Image (cartoon, rainbow, N blue to C red):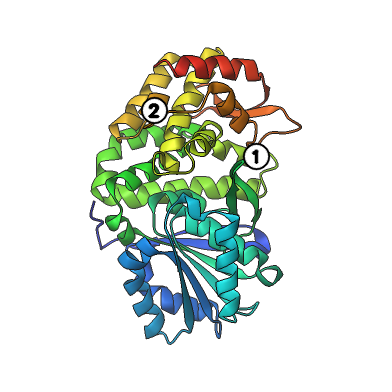
Amino acid sequence: MSTQNAQEPIIVPIDLEDRAYDIEIAPDVLDRLGGILKQKFPGARFGVVTDINVKNAQWARLQKSLDANGLDYALISIPPGENAKSMARLDSVVFALLKEKLERNDIILAFGGGVIGDLAGFAAAIMRRGMDFVQIPTSLLAQVDSSVGGKTGVNSPHGKNLIGAFHQPKFVAADLGVLDSLSDRHFRAGYAEVVKYGLIDDEEFFFWLEENQDNIFEGGPARAEAIARACRAKARVVVADEKEQGQRALLNLGHTFGHALEAATGYSDRLIHGEGVAIGMALAHRFSTSLGLSNTQDDQRVVAHLKKAGLPTNLSDIPGELPPTQELLDLIAQDKKVSRGALTFILTKGIGKAFIEKNVNPDLVFEFLNKERQK
């Protein structure tokens, strides 16, 4: 999965007036980041929050860039994994950053995948009543989704991402080179979020992904293009609906089912986030067809594409036992999109035709999940 080194940086602007920032996508942005930070935040100290895996794989590059530009920083390293997105870990990270005497005008660097981005971003949102931060996403999933748009937070035993805040970063540095160190499993999981943007409202992008999937996985020019197109798609939605009062909820295609499945598996290695999203998107398409909204041909096309990427598409693809259907339904009812107790789903009328459906009948969801469990 090597990435070509001759690519020019791609800049994707997030036009949020006084909260505007850029995403820079390039193979070497990590090596240049010290200079970028020095120019953007003169005189600031930096609190780098990362996990042990990213530290071992990527910290040397970032450290060299920070040192070369004479920047003052403190490194906070935590255990990897979704379980780090907890109130207890948030407390420890905030305590460590405060112990380093970071001031309100200093900058937190979220250096890692989606877990680190969400956790460090939330720490920035609450420390000293709000500090600025920079996203340095090191996974494909984080580069195309969680690092963009300002959603930060931690999980609860009641559900995923139920505690958090909207807090936009000041800059996003998406280094293509770091993707070369990802495991195949984590790269595939990130690809599920790329596919999502085609399934929401851009069938041409989905068709393009069908044609270019191999090149993306091989690290050819299509990889940078796919990331840039995904970021532009998310930027368009975020600018129109920053705090998810309406259409931004479309970005949760597959997540209502997926988040419930993640909670049901204890946020463990049994099912990582992108895999939950892949199953969730397959379920959302099949559920839509069961309601007479979509068609089997599109369902099969979506599933075939996800399977070619090595992603799970059925409940039976999850290792181990799942809790009873009613318990899954209870977890779905904890989803953030629930309004006054009514179930809200992102459904679809076909590839690229997703829409928000409020007040979905729980009995229909229960019946559908029971049938899916038999596959």
- Label 2 vs label 1: CA separation? 23 Å
* Residue 346 appears left or right of 135: right
Q: Nearer the viewer, residue 224 or 62?
A: 62
Q: Nearer the viewer, residue 183 or 66?
A: 183
Tell me, for residue 249, which label it has, or none.
none
- Residue drawn at (28%, 57%), measured in percent from left and top? 181
Q: Is residue 326 above or below residue 278?
A: above
* Residue 336 appears left or right of 173: right
The image shows residue 228 at horizontal and vertical percentages of 42, 51
Q: Which residue matches tag 1?
A: 336
- Residue drawn at (55%, 60%), measured in percent from left and top? 89
The image shows residue 188 at horizontal and vertical percentages of 33, 42
Type of the residue with mark 1: Lys
- Answer whether residue 173 is visible to the viewer in this image: yes
Q: Is residue 159 above or below residue 203?
A: below
Mark 2, secondary structure of its residue: loop
The image shows residue 278 at horizontal and vertical percentages of 42, 34
Q: Earlier in the sequence, mark 2 or mark 1?
A: 2
Number of numbered discs overlaid on the protein picture = 2
- Residue drawn at (56%, 74%), measured in percent from left and top? 97
- Residue drawn at (56%, 33%), measured in percent from left and top? 256
- Number of residues whose C-alpha sits closer than 10 Å to that of mark 2, classed few (under 14), some (14–19) or many (20 or more): many
Type of the residue with mark 2: Thr
- Number of residues whose C-alpha sits closer than 10 Å to that of mark 1, classed few (under 14), some (14–19) or many (20 or more): some
Mark 1, secondary structure of its residue: loop
Q: Which residue matches tag 2?
A: 313
